[in-house]
Each structure stands twice: as structure tokens, then as C-alpha cells.
Amino acid sequence: MVFPSARTGPARKAETDAATMRAPIFFMFAPRVFDGRIYFTAGKNDDIQLKMCQLVFPFKHNDRDSQSRMRPSSIIRSDDLRNENRHRLLSTLRRTGPCSPARLKGITGLSAASISTLSSQMIDQGILVSSRSPASRDRTLRGRPRSQLSLNQSAGHVVTLTLTIDRVRVQLVNYAGSVCQMQQRSLDTRALSTQQLIREICQCVDTICQLQPDLKLHHIGVAFQGATEHASGCLLWSPIIRVQNVPLGKHLHARYGVTVSVNSDSRLISEALSRSHSQRLGNTFATVLYSHGVGLGLILNGQPFVGTRSSALELGHLRFEPDGALCRCGKRGCIEAYAAGYGIARNASGQNLQANPAGRVSASEMDALVADAQAGLPSALQAFRIAGTAVGEGLVTLFTLLDPMPVALVGLNDAAFDLMRHGMESVLDAHLRNGPAAAELLHYFNHEDPFLEQGLIDNCLSCVDQLLANHNTDISITG
Ligand SMILES: [Zn+2]
């Protein structure tokens, strides 16, 4: 067994090539650490073929216990490692925008030679483009423009569908993230059968695809205002549709022949906030979405939480008041029955709490409720206070299970949040006696649409990055 020294760059590559040519019995060299795992490159000539593999150990920096316990956990073929490194480059460029190879080396930890090889392959495949930026001259190159790598907008497209109450919004987005086409259609979502709903959505996809002459469709992503099954893309339940268990993901995949992702709006908004406001919210935080209902998204250690089967996290349907107000889910006393727009309107107008919940509360109706409360109308003030208290109780449950964390409150305007703030913070401060003040944990963001659209686009394009990271993917294939 031979253990060459852990050289890097061309010297190591030459050593690798030489070792390959001489076909040693077995060799293992060049330990590298990425993402808390340690990799060794190893090869073996068994008279049939030369096999290359990567041994992967669980390993954390500065963790002596982990080092002493580390055992090989898996074997990754060299193809897998190449695809993983391609994905590392694509996801980095997705995050940073156009980037020089030198900066990519610093961010990804890949060698300059690897970046050169992988980027050349992906330029040839039409996934990346290389350009020279006159604005960023490198002094070491005596004023010559420095080359930059970026995602090729012509590498393909994704279709994004945002399904909310009474509306479907569809966009065609290129691989670089620019919106090429956008359409919005009014849809009486609660009046549609399963077949009608699927047919309407397919018509939207057909129409927008026909508008794009050079279409190369790789993926369809759906944002849904309700519970979804993440493995199949099924729409499980939502107050915005009358039917349940709509097999939308399965149908779109069969019809268009591309991968499909279906996610709850709360999750996608959380993902967008995780990227755009990480300094403010950290890498573990909750998102409470006030929309047609009350949704919850969770980012834990930088990763979105999903349930064992569904999008889960039905904060709005935790019980707030036993045998209380009738919720749209059919149960009584849910948080949503007090905190969603229809709950606030019902409380403010003094309607029977057991009456069937109203439909959509429009923005202008919500503005009128806010104006009543700001004018001092007791019933309106009380309705907003109860809404804040109900959400505060839900967050107490969350904090009890997972510890206190920052919370992004999304979807209302500043005035509505101000009216709910006191009820919410009172409940939380009573719970957080020895912890941070509620005001330090709560972060308010106005209307949800920009976060939802960006979260959906980013989610879809990250799926395409995974697809194109496989070096065998033929990007000329259209859906
Ligand atoms: Zn409910």
C-alpha cells in the first residue's frame, strides 16, 4: 500500500497520472475535508479495470471525539464525486453571481485545476459561460481583464406556478434566474373539481411554454397555499380548494416529462428569507405567514424542515380555545379561526363564532378593519389583540418544543402588525421569563409575494442545478 504525500495542484495530478500508468496494487492519498467529511482518493488494479473511489468518514473540524470514532460511512464513485463538485460550482455561482475562478477556489475549497477542468466541461455543455470583465482588472495580470464564470441563461428554463385563492400565477424563468414570461389568471379555486383544477393548471403551463420559442424545459415548481405531500407533489388539503389529495405533481410529471416539485408557500418564503436575511435571522428561525390562513415554515441549521410525509407545521390548526370558534378545517378553536383575516373580521363584526367562516378577506377589507382599530373602535381593537394572542400561544408551543428562536412574521402591513404586536409579545414575554425579550425575537416583513416568488424560483433552479450537475445530463432535451 502506498500513501503518497498530500500534494496539491499540478504536482499531485502528475503523481496521480503516474500512479495510474504504473497500475500499483493499491494506493490511497490526498486527504481533503469538505463539509465536515474527510475524503481519500484510492485506486486498485484487479487485472480487470482500474477502480477509483472516495472513502468518506464522518468528521468534524476541531472535534477530537469524532476523529477518534470515525469509521468509513460510505464509498462514493469518482463519477459521484465529479457530479458533487460540479454541483458545488453551480450552487456557488447561483449564490454569488458571476465569479472569478480564483474566488470560486476560495469559496468552494476545490483546486484551481479541478475548477478549470469542471468549468471547461460545463462551458462545452452550455451550462456555464466565461466572460472577461473589464471592470474587475487583476493587477497580477498587468491590467488584463479577469475572466469570470457565470450560469448560462440559455441552459434551460423552469416554469413556476403559484396557486393561491382565486388566482394562479405562472412564470417562465431561464437558468440564470431571469423571468422571461409571466401570466396571471383569475381562478375560482374553491369551485373546481380535481380534474378541472389540473386542467386549468396545465392550460397555464401550455400557454406560457408556447410563448417561448427556444424552450428547454427542465423543471416545474408549484407553490401551494396549503399542505402538500413532498414525495409525490400531491395537494393534500387547503382552504383555497374544495377537493383534497389532488395528484398534481404526478400529473405534471407525466404530461411534461420533467421533474416537478410542490411545496407549501410557508416553506418557500422561509427559504427566500434564509438567503436574503440570514444575518438578521440566523440559520435557525421560524416564519409565520399571514395569508388566507396562518402558516409556519422552519429553517433548522440552514435546512428547511419537512415532515415525515407532508409539509406539516400546521401552526394555524393548533388549538387556541377548546370548543372555540369554527375553523375552515372543520375543527373548533384553531389559532387560524382567530388570527386569519376571516377570524379577525368575524371577531370585529361580532358575528357568531360558530358561523361558517367567510371567504377571502380582501386587502381593502383588511385596511378598513385596521382603520377601525386605529380609530379606537373597541371590537376591532379586541379582534387584533386576540389574533396576536392566538399566534403568541402557537409560538409558545413551538418554543417549548424547539427552544426560542427568531420569528419572521410575514404577510400583513405595518399597521396590522402594530395592532397585533401587544397581544403576541405579552404571551411570549410571560413564557420567556429568563430568556430574550419577545421584541428581540420578532421580525416583521410586509407583503409576502416578493419572498414567495423568489423562494419558488430559487427552489426550482436549485433542482435544475442538481440535474445539470450530473455530467451525463443532455441539456438539449426539452420537456
Ligand atoms: Zn383548523
Image (cartoon, rainbow, N blue to C red):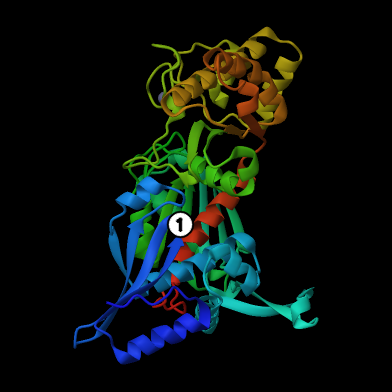
The quadrant holding residue 348 is top right
Residue drawn at x 53%, y 68% as measured from the top left:
89
Q: Quadrant of ligand 1?
A: top left
* Residue type at numbered disc 1: Asp
**Screen quadrant of the C terminus:** bottom left
The x, y position of residue 109, in whole percent, is 53, 66
For the residue with label 1, is its CB less than 8 Å from the closest atom of ligand 1? no
Q: Which residue is labeled 1 in the image?
A: 35
Q: How many numbered circles does the render carry?
A: 1
Q: Is residue 128 above or below residue 449?
A: below
Q: Quick one: SS at disc 1?
A: loop
Q: Is residue 345 above or below residue 275?
A: above
* Horizontal side of residue 243 vs 94, given as left or right: left
The quadrant holding residue 98 is bottom right
The x, y position of residue 196, in whole percent, is 40, 49
Q: Say if residue 13 shows up in the picture.
A: yes
The x, y position of residue 32, in whole percent, is 44, 66
Residue drawn at x 50%, y 24% as measured from the top left:
395
* Horizontal side of residue 467 vs 414, given as left or right: left
The x, y position of residue 94, in whole percent, is 58, 63
Q: In this view, does 466 lie above or below 224?
A: below
**Screen quadrant of the N terminus:** bottom left
